[in-house]
Image: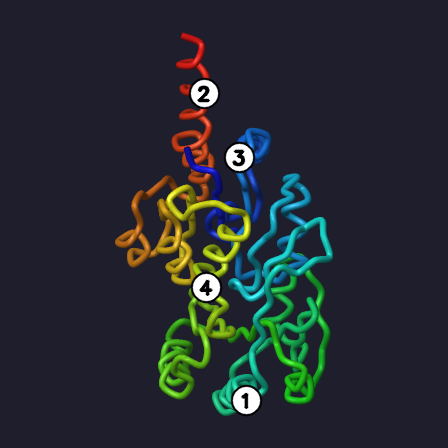
Amino acid sequence: MYKMIAIDLDGTLLTDELAVTKDTATAIRKAAELGVVVTIATGRMYPSAQHIALELGLEAPMITYQGAVIRSATSEEVLRERMVSYEIAQKCIHLAAEKQMHIQVYQDNVLYSAVDNEQVKAYSKEVGIGYTVEPDLLGLAKKGFTKLLFIDEPEALAPVQEELQTVLGDAACIEKSKKRYLEVTHPDANKGSALAFLAEELGIDRSEVIGIGDNFNDMDLVKAAGFGVAMGNAVDELKEIADYTSLSNNEEGVLHVLNKFILEPRASAVEASKK
């Protein structure tokens, strides 16, 4: 019996309309009532994930900012936090300026952009979180960032990702979370290491954990889980390493996983115990 399931948000739990279907929400609540730890594992900032978790009634610590922050939706306690150093942030900000590319940063659960442009406006609308314009991102960087995010077309991001990986090496975690999103976090801030940490904290063995996602930033999550699931709409690279491929996010792929691997096995066990 699986005791924990960690679910990505965009492209996984959320439909393309950025909604959780009614049946999926019901199944999540039912799994939680049965004692299963249901948690969110997202690249989104904490306040954005918190809003969704509260709607679903989730109380387990959440993995946010790609694994940089683990914190419950209902508690002030931070179980783990990994910040990007000033040196790494400085290199990213300089590179963004050199490439004339949008970059936004996260600090103390606030989203900052040096300019008020279409990229940050669209992002803010998508995740339902406001932002603050601060021209001096380097000044902010001295306190450390939870995450930095480059936003541009895929063909523009590809060489930037390659350059960052060459320059930064193992000093940072550099991952695509969407076609137009390239994220930079602390080297230990990925969904896989966060999931392993959280499971250990909760006394749950890796073999009892399901991890489900759809994109490159979910690779570590799927590998760290005892049973890794790729959505039907996932990138091919994730499907190749997953133990199972579900339906797409618009076909209630998370609901399918909850029913097949958590709710139905428990119902069968109850029936068997009555015989």
Display coloring: rainbow
Determine the CA span between mark 3 and mark 2: 17 Å
Which residue type does callout 4 highlight?
Ser
Give the mark nearest the N terminus, 3 or 4: 3
Label 4 neighbour load within 10 Å: few <14, some 14-19, many 20+ = many
Label 2 or label 4, whichever comes before in sequence order: 4
Q: Quadrant of residue 146?
A: bottom right
Decide which of tag 3 and tag 2 comes sooner along the chain. 3
Instruction: Write down the residue under mark 4.
Output: 177
Q: Which residue is mark 1?
A: 87
Q: Which x, y percent locates residue 77?
A: 70, 58
**Residue 181 placement, left or right of 227:** right
| The quadrant where residue 217 appears | bottom left
| Distance of label 3 from label 1 (alpha carbons) | 43 Å
- Residue 267's disc is 2
The residue carrying mark 3 is 24
Q: Position of residue 119 (x, y in %)?
A: 58, 71
Residue 123 versus residue 173 in the image, above or below: above
Name the kind of residue labelled 2 in the image. Ala
Q: Residues within 10 Å of mark 3 (few under 14, many from 20)?
A: many
**What's the distance in space between the residues labelled 1 and 4, CA to CA?**
23 Å
**Crowding at mark 1 (Cα within 10 Å: few <14, some 14-19, many 20+):** some
Pointers 3 and 1 in contact (CB under 8 A)?
Answer: no
Label 3 and label 4: CA atoms lie apart by: 23 Å
* In front: label 3 or label 2: 2
What is the quadrant of the C terminus in the image? top left
- Residue at the (69%, 66%) spot, across then down: 109
Q: Which residue is painted at 66% across and 86% down in the image?
A: 142
What kind of residue is marked 1?
Glu
- Report which quarter residue 261 is drawn in: top left
